[in-house]
Amino acid sequence: MKLLVFGSTGQVATELKALAPEARFLARADVDLTDASACAKIIRESDAEAVINAAAYTAVDKAESEDSAARAINGHAPGAMAHAAAARGIPFVHISTDYVFDGSGDTPRTPDAPTAPLGAYGRTKLRGEEKVREAGGVHAILRTSWVFSAHGTNFVKTMLRLGAERKKLTIVADQIGGPTPAADIAAACLRIAGDLSASPDKSGTYHFSGAPDASWADFAREIFAQAKIDCAVEDIPTSAYPTPATRPLNSRLDCSSTETTFGIPRPDWHAGLAHVLTQLEKAQT
Ligand SMILES: NC(=O)C1=CN([C@@H]2O[C@H](COP(=O)(O)OP(=O)(O)OC[C@H]3O[C@@H](n4cnc5c(N)ncnc54)[C@H](OP(=O)(O)O)[C@@H]3O)[C@@H](O)[C@H]2O)C=CC1
Ligand SMILES: Cc1cn([C@H]2C[C@H](O)[C@@H](COP(=O)(O)OP(=O)(O)O[C@H]3O[C@@H](C)C(=O)[C@@H](O)[C@H]3O)O2)c(=O)[nH]c1=O
Ligand SMILES: [Mg+2]
C-alpha cells in the first residue's frame, strides 16, 4: 500500500521509516504544518492509498505561551489533511494523546469518555481530533501516551542524562499512565491503515498505551534498573514539581477496543524499554 506520512524526524515517524522505508515521509522542509492548505495540496496531488499524520507540536509547557502555533499544527493541519484524504476516499490515521482528558478518578478511560484538557497542548490536540471527525472520511484517531524511543526528546533520554549527573532525582509519583514505545505505535498505525482500507466501518477513536500502567517515578526506577545507573528516585507529588502546563493525574487508557477491532494488544513497555536501551548503547559504540 502506498503510504504518505507527515513527519520524518520525530519519534513515531522515525520508527515508521524503519518499518515502512518505501513510504513517502514529509519533513518540515517539504511541508510546514503551520500551512494547512499546503498539507491538503500534497494529499490532493499524491497517489497515496493512505495517509498517516505523525507530526505535531509536542512541547507541552511551551504550548502554554505558543498557543497559536500549537493550534495551527495540532488543530488546523490535521483537519485539512483529513478533508483532503476524505475527498480522495483514502484512510487517514491520526495520533492523539491522553492529555485530552482531565485526569480525574483512577480508572482507565474508554475512547468515548468525556474530554476536558487541562492545558494548551491537550486543547489543540482535541481540536485536531474534532476536525478529523468532522471531515467525515475513513479515519482512525489513535490516542497514545508517554511515548519513548531512542530518537528525539523523551522521558527515557532525559532520565539517562540526569541519572548520570545526579545521585538522586525527585520524580512525580501521582501521575499514572502507560509508557508507550514509539516502535509499537508505528506498527499499530501501519496495521490500522491497512485494515481501514479493507474495512472502512472500523473508523473511529481508539486507545493504545503500553502496559502495565505506572507512575513517572516507577518509570524512572525501571529505566535506572535496566540501564544499571546508580540513581535513587524519590517519589514526590505533582504539587512539588511546578510546571507551566498542568498534566493529568490519571492517564490510564482503556485499550480494549483496539485489541478487539484490530487485534493489537497493549505492548509491554518493560520489553520496549530494554530494546530502546540496546539501540542507544549500539549508537554510542
Ligand atoms: N511524545 C509523546 O509523549 C506523545 C506524543 N503523542 C502524539 O504522537 C504523535 C507523534 O509524536 P512524537 O513522535 O513523539 O513527536 P516528536 O515531538 O518526536 O516529533 C514531532 C514531529 O513533528 C514535526 N513538526 C513539528 N512542527 C512542525 C511543523 N510546523 N511543520 C512540519 N513538521 C513539524 C517535527 O519536525 P521537526 O523535527 O522538524 O521539528 C517532528 O518530526 C503526535 O501526534 C503527538 O501529539 C501522543 C502522546 C504522547
Ligand atoms: C525531568 C523531571 C520530570 N518530572 C515530571 C514532570 C512530568 O510530570 C513528568 C514527565 O515529564 P515530561 O516533560 O517528559 O512529560 P511531558 O512532556 O508532559 O510528556 C507528555 O508529552 C506529550 C507530548 C504527551 O502527549 C503525553 O502523553 C506525555 O508523554 O515527569 C519530574 O517529576 N522530575 C524530573 O526531574
Ligand atoms: Mg515533553
Image: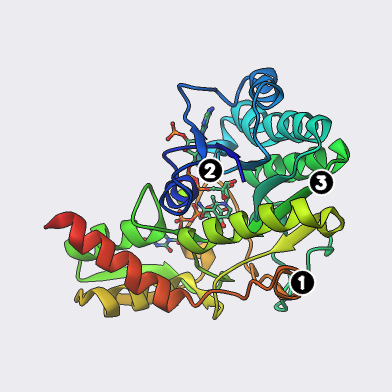
Does the residue at mark 1 contact the one at mark 2 (Cβ under 8 Å)? Answer: no
As drawn, is 278 to the left or to the right of 221?
Answer: left
What is the quadrant of residue 124 in the picture?
A: top right
Numbered circle sitting on residue 58: 2
Residue at 55 percent of width and 78 percent of height = 211
Numbered circle sitting on residue 18: none
Numbered circle sitting on residue 257: 1
Residue 279 visible in the picture: yes
Nearest to the observer: residue 153 or residue 68:
153
- Of helix, strand and loop, which one carries label 3? loop
What is the quadrant of residue 254 in the picture?
A: bottom right
Which residue is the site of mark 3? 138
Coloring applied to the structure:
rainbow
- Of helix, strand and loop, which one carries label 2? loop
Q: Calculate the distance from the C-alpha at mark 3 to the C-alpha at mark 1.
A: 17 Å
Residue at 61 percent of width and 33 percent of height = 70
Q: Amino acid at mark 3?
A: Val
Nearest to the observer: residue 157 or residue 209:
209
